[in-house]
Amino acid sequence: MKKIVFFLLGVLVLSTLSGCGYNSIQANEEAVFAAWGNVEATYQRRADLIPNLVEVVKGYAKHESDTLTAVTEARAKVGSMQISKEALNDPATFAKFQQAQGELSGALSRLMVVVERYPDLKANQNFLDLQNQLEGTENRINVARVRYNQAVEVFNVSIRTFPNSLTNSMLLHLQRKEPFKADEGSKIAPKVKF
């Protein structure tokens, strides 16, 4: 008789735990970490392409060293800044990382303005290939950011809704994750002048 009572009690406990959201919260957090890994991978792809792009441009625009130096320095700053999974909970660290990536994007934009001044460079096949790869990488970065934000949304909702919120407050104590936010000034459309 005692065995049956313990068995039924065990079944009751297991059925209660399966509905508490413990496993789904854990899975959602892992999805956030995986999405963040994809963001970092696309940033790494961009960082790997930039030296090649800079070298091609250097060959044509030797006296535009300020712009090339800015791109190289921004890439180095981004490369030296590592962000851990734990830092995803720290808004200040996350903002610094986003700022460094924004500086790199700005330096690349200035580099493209330099390119416009050199028609021979724009016709160079190596440059065109690198430019296409860089454009594709920027698109991949955007897609990875969107997917990261979606994973963050799912996770944040999962720890704030009932009954998962009880499980989180009693057992896990996980904090909300920070989504990517637009850079300051990005709400204003850039002006194009010819």
Image (spheres, grey):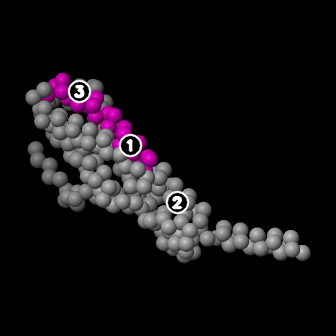
Image disc number at residue 28: 2
Q: Where 6 sits versus 194, above or below?
A: below
Name the kind of residue labelled 1 in the image.
Thr
Instruction: Locate the C terminus by quadrant.
Output: top left
In the rendered image of this protein, does residue 157 appear above or below residue 140?
below
Which residue lies under the disc numbered 1?
42
Q: How far apart are marks 2 and 1 (CA)?
A: 21 Å
User: In the rendered structure, which amino acid carries the disc numbered 2?
Assistant: Asn
- The CA distance from mark 3 to mark 2 is 43 Å
* Sequence-earlier tag: 3 or 1: 1
Mark 1 is surrounded, within 10 Å at the Cα level, by few (under 14), some (14 to 19) or many (20 or more) other residues, namely many
- At x 17%, y 41%, the residue is 110
Task: Name the residue beneath numbered marker 3.
Answer: 56
- Left or right relative to 11: residue 102: left
Label 1 residue SS: helix
Q: Can residue 185 be seen in this view?
A: yes
Closer to us: 175 or 106: 175
Indicate yes or no whether the magenta region holds residue 53.
yes
Q: Dominant secondary structure of the magenta stretch?
A: helix
Kind of residue indicated by mark 3: Val
Q: Position of residue 59 (x, y in %)?
A: 18, 24
Chain part drawn in magenta? 36-61
Mark 2 surroundings within 10 Å by alpha-carbon count, few (fewer than 14), some (14 through 19), many (20 or more): many
